[in-house]
Image (cartoon, grey):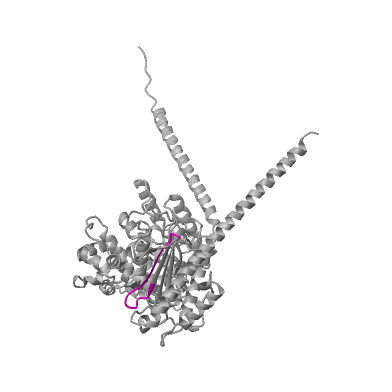
Amino acid sequence: MSYVAPPNRRKSWFRLLTIGQKKLMYVCILGAGMMVCALSVLGVYGYRALQYDLSRISGVKETSRLLDSGNRLIASLADDADAFVSRDELPANLVNAFVAREDETFFDHDGVVLTSVLRSVIRNIISMRYEQGASTITMQLTRNVFELSGKSMDRKILETMLALRIEHNFDKYTILEQYLSRIFYGQNCYGIRAAARHYFGKSVRDLDLVECATLAGLVRAPSLFNPVRSMESARRVKAETLQRMLACEMITQEQCNEATAAPIVLKRGVVSADTSSSYTVRWTRRELEELGDAVPEHSGGIAVVSSLNLPLQQYVEQAVEKALSAVENPGVYPEAWLAGLSPEAATAAQTAFAKLKRPEGMKVRGANNDMSGLLQSCVLVVDARRNHQGKVLAVVGGRCAVDGRDRWMETVRPGRVSAPLLFCCACLPGGEGAHIIARSAEVTGRQLGYDVVCSFYDSLNLSLKLPPREQELYLYNGLFQMRRMDLARLLFCLQNQGRGYRLSLVNDVWNSNQQLIYHYEPEKSSEYIRRESARIVADLPPFRKQEDRSVTMSEYLPEGGGYWTMVFRPGEVCIFVWVGYDDPADPNATSREMRVLLPRATQNLTREIDEWLLTQKRLERQKKKEAAMQEQLRREAELKNQQQAQQQNQPS
């Protein structure tokens, strides 16, 4: 009989306890490892955060600059509205609106809300992508000042550590001032000063509750929620902001209801007292606004590298003023107009121009900046080289930018200058039966019919207000309003086989950290006007082909609209010049004296700019030739020295 010992209960229980201890030990080791990793990560990011200069928070905001194609400074894109706003200027409703909308615990936290960060991390881990940012106002300021771009955990942790540093070194109102003065408000507005002036035409301290809620609501998506682009979206985010303010007990129910029902009243176009920006700056701001989401949001300290040629821009500005002064003053005759003339011919030209009568009531520019009633001019020089088509080399929109007007964006009646467009319509499929009467756009238009011509103009996608059917002759004769810019673009298109190039000057945009945030890609432009039509019309009047292959156009615009000229050099450059009065009803605009003066002045100015470009091209070729010759001489000298050295090293 064998004896089987009973199981050792204590030993089995101890074994179970031992397994539990091992598990606990593993958990503790894992927890300690994670703690060490977390502390290491915080240490690394804390060290990285220490490398950033916090003086940029309270320092002068970096100015946006406009550079030409050779990286030469043209002008600053900033103005007085870009200055920092002080706490004394901030209305209580503005502070409350932004705090309620963006960070309701702003005055209580230390730059980071840990619960929001943890919730964001968990949400991002679950979705396996970056969905939530949990950014406080301090973190948003950090991102704006130091241009921390991209959506990644690396950026978020660094942003968090920097926010903690900022909170430790600056008080809440300094952080709020800097935040409001730097963020993007849409419509090329950086800072609350610029936004208040652009949208509502007033200073920051005068903003009411409706305006404060509107501005606070649009900052999350400035290109979508600004009232200029979408009033309905702006009203929606305004209402959401007001509801947040009500929930935070910052306003009463009555105030909320009243402000929600109140309309958003825009007062755009208000010009500040310091209107020193140039036409190039005005064009750049407009183009950046049109690019919209193509240029990522930034804190405003950008560098815009343009296609402009600074020496050409400066020359054109001076040439315009000299040309108009010559019309106003009989004793003034620009020396550039005498280029290529013999001494006798130059004297005769000066004398003949001086003898031309001027209108008795003609206003002459004085020492002040009163531009009203003066003779004006605008010039546009466009690159016509392959892969550069449509890039602006120089632009002038009047005699002085102080008057706040850009005449390229204003309308004129094109008259006979629009005849090539009508002729293109006659060349479209289905219009073979209509013959182009080059000397009479009206006859050609009658053959085509009102509906066909209107349909063609509609296909160009321009904001034109065409004459009604009972005034169809106005349509055929170009007696409708068209922006000068659109007219220039269409003529440029016709001379480029119908390709619809966009006239632009922005090439690259760099942020304050020298990171490229936008780059212009040469357009592979499709046919804007049928190619066969454009090729036929490009050789017809009012275009005139010259012996040097250039194409010119010189025409009066109807009813006192001024004088228009164009010079197109295939594969090189295209020049547009307009000279006239802002008000076609001005007696001087239709006077007999100006009918004689305007063609001479406009054609001379156009020829002067064209000659300057040709001269610069010859000088550039000469420099390249000289550089090539010097390089060749250097290589020959280097080869000769090598041969001499080899001969000396050979044994005798």
Q: Pick the residue in front: 320 or 250.
A: 320
Q: Is residue 170 above or below residue 389?
A: below
Work out whether residue 460 can be spotted.
Answer: no
Decide whether residue 482 is among the magenta residues.
no
Count up the numbered dots.
Answer: 0
Q: Residue at (49%, 65%) from the top-left corner?
A: 66
Determine which quarter of the picture holds residue 284. Answer: bottom left
Q: Quadrant of the C terminus?
A: top right
Determine which quarter of the picture holds residue 182. Answer: bottom left
From which residue to which does the magenta span run?
Answer: 548-563
Residue furthest front in the image: 344
Q: Position of residue 575 (x, y in %)?
A: 43, 65
Residue furthest bottom in the image: 360
Q: Pick the residue in front: 284 or 273.
A: 284
Decide whether residue 553 is among the magenta residues.
yes
Residue furthest top in the image: 1
Q: Position of residue 593 (x, y in %)?
A: 40, 82
Q: Is residue 27 above or below residue 94?
A: above
Horizontal placement of 516 versus 466: left or right? Answer: right
Q: Quadrant of the N terminus?
A: top left
Q: Position of residue 109 (x, y in %)?
A: 43, 62
Q: Pick the residue in front: 396 or 47.
A: 396
Q: Position of residue 204 (x, y in %)?
A: 40, 75
Work out whether residue 642 can be spotted.
Answer: yes
Q: Pick the residue in front: 616 or 127.
A: 616
Q: Residue at (47%, 76%) from the top-left corner?
A: 323
Residue furthest left in the image: 470
